Amino acid sequence: MGWTPSPADGTGTIVMRTSTALYPFDVVGDPEAVEAVVALGVDEVSLAGAYHAVRAVTPRHPQHRIVTAQRSAVYYVPDAPTWSGRYLQPSRAEGEGVCDSFGPALDELRAAGLGVNAWVVLAHSCGTGGEQAASHVTNAFGDSYPWALCIARPEVVEYAATLAGEIVGRFAPDGVELEACGWYGFDHLNAHDKVHAEQSSAAERYLLSVCFCEACEGSYRAAGIDLPHLREVVAGSLRDGDGRPRPDGSSDSVGAEEEIRARLGADLADALLCVRLAAADRMRRAVVSAVRAAARGRSTFLWLHAQGARHGVGGNVGVDPSAALSDVDGLLYGAPSDSPVAVAEAASVAREMPGRRVGIVVDVLGTQDDGGARLAKVVGDARDAGATDLHLYHAGLASADGRRILAGLVNGFGS
Ligand SMILES: [Zn+2]
């Protein structure tokens, strides 16, 4: 199926579409890459344009095998006048065939009839603002997280909106996938993590993500929250040996929300969440506004990576779906969260907001043991529940077996 920008087929029926994630350095320098992606049967590609630090395997590429980016980077040359004088600046990716690869990869994929969504990672920003530590999330103990930008801060909102707008204005992609367009925090997949034994529950990770930078403290005060009390109760709840009864650490979102309310008290937990969701709404709207302005009337479909837990922090940000869909065009639920959870979250949106595009992201990496049977069921369940889009992670990282599974899932989603 060739790319059609309209989300509907002219009769009001939403056309189901499939996409796969790809890095631009998977494409540039590999003369067989685009044809191999077309052979997977996907309609679109989610092409990384601004991405967090990464160590990526490129199993089929003739010129490299492992690509490493030590910090968050953009895969194009940032426009100097656009960024002149701005407090936070994007870094350029390094390496031949890696730096400046976004534009050439987009052109090659489009020439083959594929739609291209620019995949843009915002608040998850390893190393960005390294000299501006005030821009990072700071926990209740005063520890700064150099991988997470605090979205309550004006310079961070400006950075995110400028970045997303620049990519759309420069490259005119068919759509944009916004990742970490909202709160990022403690969780950070990292090869050197030494934190698993100490912090286990979703509620604890949320509490470790609550920011106490100056901007956030101002927001809490403005909302009538007793700041010293908030800091004490968040930090106290996270200290070992405090003698308090600790609810069972729960990893599901409902259990996590209950645990947060038990630890903070319901009123304080709700007031805190309200402030944080308002900041996320402001940031997302600034980014969306910048993207729409940069598109200059051109159809540009805007996806938001989301999760159903409103307190949720990470690449998939916690949202109220109706609030988010008042400015973005579609919501993507899924990896790295549990697939059945993503299906349930997507199903809920499909049920409550019929006619809107809602997709799931399914991770095909490391699924070869059962030949993809479990994922085929997830994809079938998602389709039956009303998901309109299937995004598959990740055609570049996948092995040959992974790609076969990916192609099978594409086929199954449309049948
Ligand atoms: Zn903050």
Image (tube, helix red, strand yellow):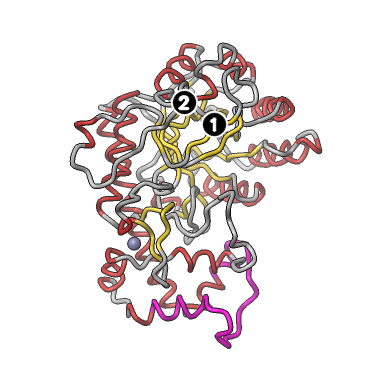
Q: Position of residue 116 (x, y in %)?
A: 46, 24
Check the picture and name the quadrant holding the C terminus: top right
Q: Under tag 2, what secondary structure?
A: loop
Q: Position of residue 348 (x, y in %)?
A: 56, 50
Is residue 276 rendered to the left or right of residue 296? right
Residue placed most toward the observer, 100 or 102? 100
Q: Residue under circle 2?
A: 98
Q: Residue under circle 1?
A: 67
Give yes or no for contact between labels 1 and 2 (Cβ–Cβ under 8 Å).
yes
Is residue 305 rendered to the left or right of residue 253? left
Range drawn in magenta: 230-257
Task: Mark yes or no: residue 415 visible.
Answer: no
Please check the rendered image and state whether residue 240 is part of the magenta-colored stretch, yes or no.
yes
Residue placed most toward the observer, 287 or 2? 287
Please check the rendered image and state whether residue 121 is part of the magenta-colored stretch, yes or no.
no
Q: Under tag 1, what secondary structure?
A: strand
Look at label 1 and name its amino acid. Val
User: What residue do we see at 47% from left, 61% from top?
Assistant: 311
Q: Give ligand 1's quarter of the image.
A: bottom left
Look at label 2 and name its amino acid. Val
Is residue 175 rendered to the left or right of residue 309? left
Q: Is mark 1 within 8 Å of ligand 1?
A: no
User: What residue do we see at 76% from left, 41% from top?
Assistant: 374
